[in-house]
Image: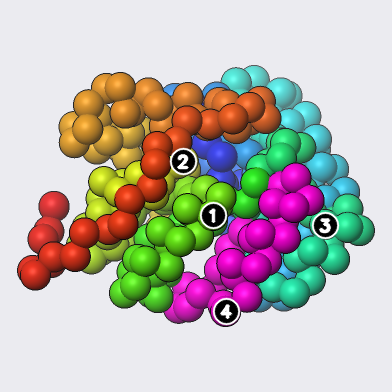
Amino acid sequence: MIDIHCHILPGIDDGAQTIEDSLEMARRAVQEGITAIIATPHHNKAGYVNPKEEIVRKCKELNDILQSENLPLEILPGQEPAIGGELIEDFENKRLQTLNGTQYLFVEMPSSQVPRYTERLLFDLQLKGIVPIIVHPERNRELLENPELLYQLVKKGALTQLTAGSLTGRFGKKIRTFSFDILNSNLVHLIASDAHNITTRAFHLQAAYEEIKKTYGTDMQYLFMENAELLVEGQNIYKEMPQRVKKKKFLGIF
């Protein structure tokens, strides 16, 4: 099992703060059956600046420590850059770290809104050969209130990554319900932990895959797991034709 979104690198953002924190997260990941993690520290958000070369160096350091501790876990380089005008400039200046050096790049929007320039920026990235992946869209207030925006972004080539904890109810019933709404509409392509620690923001990846299996069956569970593997290898992931989220008269709770 591969986790493509995790804040396991120590001391560079709001995830692991020390090497011991990173080791605790690594041990928990192994217990969950995770064999590889893409480290995705924040970039250009809340004062965190983590350019590509720094991430690659930190990943190597952590892999060396994991080897010395005999932990069967591989850390791969990634990044979680905030959406903004500097995104294209950072790409051109080779400061962006795509996911394991592939064509896939995370893009994080503000939690409360979708910036007006989002569609254009994601299009510009695609023109440069990048496949943008919108992280945790289910936790964006504007997308939750107006899922048509998400449908349009996916229809025009963006992918999305759902947070495991959203499926298991860690962020509340409303976000859990919306998570299933966008799953039902083929607006989710990848599932990842977005783990920051082993307490308040832990992995929950195995539990999320169990939710997928229980609701949609084993084939869907394996599809999402395989998509993570295909992403790491830089291959095309499986995706279905996106659909609009059906409006409900009453908000159902799973």
Label 2: which secondary element: strand
Mark 1 Cα-neighbour bin, 10 Å: few <14, some 14–19, many ≥20: some
Which residue corresponds to the image point at 41% horizontal and 32% vertical from the top-left?
224
Nearer-N-terminus badge (4/3): 3
Nearer-N-terminus badge (3/1): 3
Nearer-N-terminus badge (1/4): 4
Which residue corresponds to the image point at 22% horizontal and 32% vertical from the top-left?
216
Q: Which residue is mark 4?
A: 116
Front residue of 227/66: it is 227
Mark 3 Cα-neighbour bin, 10 Å: few <14, some 14–19, many ≥20: some
Region in magenta = 107-130
Q: Amino acid at mark 2?
A: Leu
Label 1: which secondary element: loop
Q: Which residue is mark 2?
A: 190
Q: Are marks 1 and 4 in contact (CB under 8 Å)?
A: no
Q: Which residue is mark 1?
A: 156
